[in-house]
Image (cartoon, grey):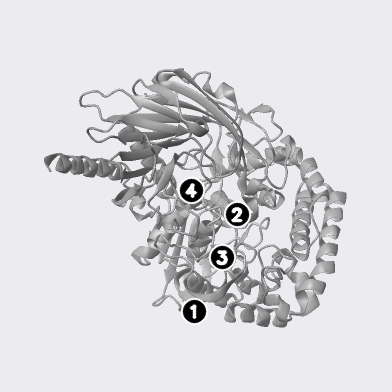
Amino acid sequence: MAMKQVSRLRCVLAVSLVVMAAVGSQGRSVLDRVNVFMGSAGDNGQLAPAATVPFGMVSVCPDSDPRQHAGYDYEVARISGISLNRISGVGGSGCGGNVSLMPDAEGKDIRIDKSTEQAGPGYYRATLSNGVGVELTATRDMAVERFTFPAGKDKVIVLNPTASFEKIYQYHFRVLNDRTAQGGLISRNTCGRGYYHLLYRIHTDQAYSTDTLGNGRVRFTFPDQPGQRTVEVRIVVAPGTPQYFANLTPEKVWATPFQALRQQAARQWEAVLGPVQVKGGSKDEQTMFYTALFRTYHSPFQVTDKDFTHYMGTDGQTYEATAHTYYSCWSLWDTYRTKFSLIMLLQPGRSRDILWSMAQLYTTGKQDWSTNYECTPTVRSEHAIATLLDAFRKGIVSEQTMRAAYPGMAAEANRLPHRSPDQCLETASDYWALAQLAGELGYDSECRLWRQRGEQMFDSIWPRHFQNIDATYTKMRGNGLYQGTRWQYRWAAPMFLDRMEAMHGRERLAEELNTFFRDSLYNQGNEPDIHVPFLFGRLGQPQKTGPLVHALMLDSIMHRYGGNDAYPAPYRGHAFKNAPRGYCPEMDEDDGAMSAWFVFASMGLYPLIVGEPVYELFSPVFDEITFRSGKAKIVIRTRGRHHPRQTLQRVTWNGRRLDAFRIAHSDLVQGGQLIFWY
């Protein structure tokens, strides 16, 4: 009993140290307002409470058996091991799940004692059913795993080098000495598209002997030493380039103790979350806000740093990032409407490297989905043109970078698909973005070409497939469209809203937009229409946006649709909630797409058209939000609001009334006060 009390005391002290290290200027850590278990149960977000750092390549936690897409399932105690990588919230079969360790000789029916499970940004701990205590933390490129074995139990850890959420194409592994081993693998990427290449080196804090088991597994056995029941394993991952390990010495790997690394991870999270401060709202609303911001910063993965500047390009060649840090891992079909606009606003300095890295895809061989030479797990990269146009207009990427990428963009535009009506709308949108970019770069003839192609494609598709509503518009699966109904896709190209008005009439469009939400035809469970709640201002009804968005975020309402089809019976409940089942059934969080949507919706800002650097304005959730964009300080306040659904009367920016309920990015990032008056 005394030993248990001492152990608890040590745990409380360690947690206190991390919290003290991460306390913000107001005396309370924002890390206390992050629930890493939100969205981690069942098919309700596809998230995991993995230990990771902002934009880190490592995301380490147990994998449930059976698992969900991100490996972990809050409601499944049995595990298959502890793996070191995953993409947050993606569908399909997930991606990652590599270099799995099991601290048990047999590895059969090992379960998490759920009463012992704790986690927060950068840290995870639990006790397993075999009595082994597990603690996990991470750096950008290293999984740090500490196992404490009970007295009388052999200190054995089994490595599965073929573990993966998708099919392994190749793998290799060898022991270098009695404390170091090295391996590598090539695995299918998300949804079985393309391959990523991963190299890793395993370091242990004490000597081991090894033997092999079936299916390529390797057993590490550590000698029994009096008073030494803990084994620490550190696994460094490399972005597809073996040179990464050239200067990696044991002294570097072990230079920082576990608790210091844990505190370091907490400080990194505090550094990106802490600058955004909110006042007002409920405790759950604040927790959901900071958890959403936390999820937004999981990817793309930072691949290079000041000590190692080389990375594997999407053509399989090695490149050097000298003036920039290189990032990898994209899920743009899901994220381009929300996530990158948010990162550009809140992290403009880091965004310069992220968007430069995205532009490099056009010079090293970009495909819509994964290539065969990805240096990290990834998903897909459609709509990078619009995202880069947005970044260019916001001053995030240079003209030189865009000119270098432009030929690849034009080549991509010429092969964009238009086999189905939804593809035609998405392709027309990309043509619009490329025309805008060509105009910015002074390519006038190219600008006219892509503008005409975009308008012609939209004009040929929208009247035929999306203008005149009939009974087929509510059908989702089997309708010839990708993960959406005709009702949802008819609003998919807001940059052509003026053409929709010319064909259909503004009043009629506004009436049908009201019907769309009144009859629960909107789908919060997938991305094709997540921008549609913010269209009202463009149709002359801006006051309708705030109450609608608040209901979608915070109320229990009826939902007809999940991620891929209509529910057998409509689901009535919250789309977002502070709980393990934190999202609608079948709703993927999708690599920060839904999280960034929630953050923007909470702030009263939304970037309706990616590439048009303007935010729609509507009632924010909180009474006050303060954040920085670079050196500029922005304060969002409400005045005269007595209840959440109160009608918004006007918005002022530094005392000037904004008649259109809209503000330009260039104005916002100068700093000042955005006040919502009721």
Q: Is residue 506 left or right of residue 659?
A: right
Give the residue pinned by disc 3: 525
Q: Name the spot of residue 412 as percent of width and height, x first.
A: 78, 47
Nearer the observer: mark 2 or 4; the answer is: 4
Q: Is residue 345 above or below residue 461?
A: above
**Residue 62 is at least partly visible in this image:** no
Which label's residue is closer to the chain start, 4 or 1?
A: 4
- Asked whether 493 or 257 is in front, the reply is 257
Q: Residues within 10 Å of mark 4 (few under 14, many from 20)?
A: many
Tag 3: amino acid: Gly
* Residue 635 position by quadrant: bottom left
Give the residue pinned by disc 4: 71
Tag 4: amino acid: Gly
Nearer the observer: mark 3 or 4; the answer is: 4
Mark 1 and mark 2 in contact? Answer it, CB < 8 Å.
no
Which label's residue is closer to the chain start, 3 or 4?
A: 4
Which label's residue is closer to the chain start, 2 or 4?
A: 4
Mark 2 and mark 4 in contact? Answer it, CB < 8 Å.
no
Query: Which of the numbered marks, if any, corresponds to residue 335?
Result: 2
Q: Residue furthest left?
A: 2
Q: CA distance from mark 4 to mark 1?
A: 44 Å
Q: Secondary structure at mark 4?
A: loop
Q: Name the spot of residue 278 as percent of width and height, x first.
A: 39, 59
Give the residue pinned by disc 1: 647
Q: Is residue 172 left or right of residue 282?
A: right
Q: CA distance from mark 2 to mark 3?
A: 14 Å
Tag 2: amino acid: Thr
Q: Is residue 151 above or below residue 15?
A: above
Residue drawn at the location 54% of the way across and 50% of the way down: 343
Which label's residue is closer to the chain start, 1 or 2?
A: 2
Which label's residue is closer to the chain start, 2 or 3?
A: 2
Q: Secondary structure at mark 3?
A: loop
